[in-house]
Image: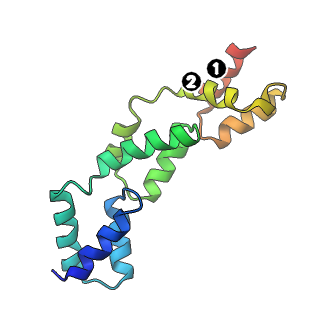
Amino acid sequence: MPKDALTIALRFLKFRPRSVFEIRKKLEAKRIDEKEIEKVISVLKKNKLLDDREFAKMWVRDRNLLKLSGAFLLKMELRKLGVSAEDIEEALKDQDEESLARQALESKSRLKDAGYEKKVGFLRRRGFKTSVIYKVLREGQ
């Protein structure tokens, strides 16, 4: 395995954890042979530097620290990053949508006196399900 393929992958991982899909795309963009890509991915997995399930859990946790988001938005982001449906479901299984929606509304002081439609729009853009949005807003009145 040429050292450059592994070096490229490690340098790419230096900034933030990555999914297998992201590493594969990066190495393909650098015109690395498919066999070499598989070897690099295997080495990274063996050394626990690449794990889609842990990556998805970390992504959900970090996104909710930075910007409270609903499951729909997080699923879309993780799908774009090539994470499998099973790993996405595992990462989202403990997410309390109602609590997060309430916190998201409370975090925006400009929405305190906003109308019902503005609050609905805000929560929809954050990826919360319609049923969760209406339940949270009904309780808040």
Task: State the image quarter where residue 133 is shown.
Answer: top right
Residue for badge 1: 135
**The residue tagged with tag 1: helix, strand or loop?**
helix
Q: What type is the residue that disc 2 sits on?
A: Glu
Residue for badge 2: 98
How is this picture coloured? rainbow
Is mark 2 in CB contact (under 8 Å) with mark 1? yes
Task: State the image quarter where residue 110 is shown.
Answer: top right
Where residue 47 appears, as percent x and y from the top left, is 17, 57
Task: State the image quarter where residue 60 is shown.
Answer: top left
Q: What type is the residue that disc 1 sits on?
A: Lys
Of residues 3 and 20, the one drawn nearer to the viewer in this rendering = 3
Q: Can residue 131 be seen from the camera position used here?
A: no
Where residue 138 appears, as percent x and y from the top left, is 70, 16
Where residue 119 appears, as percent x and y from the top left, is 75, 31
Q: Which mark is residue 94?
A: none
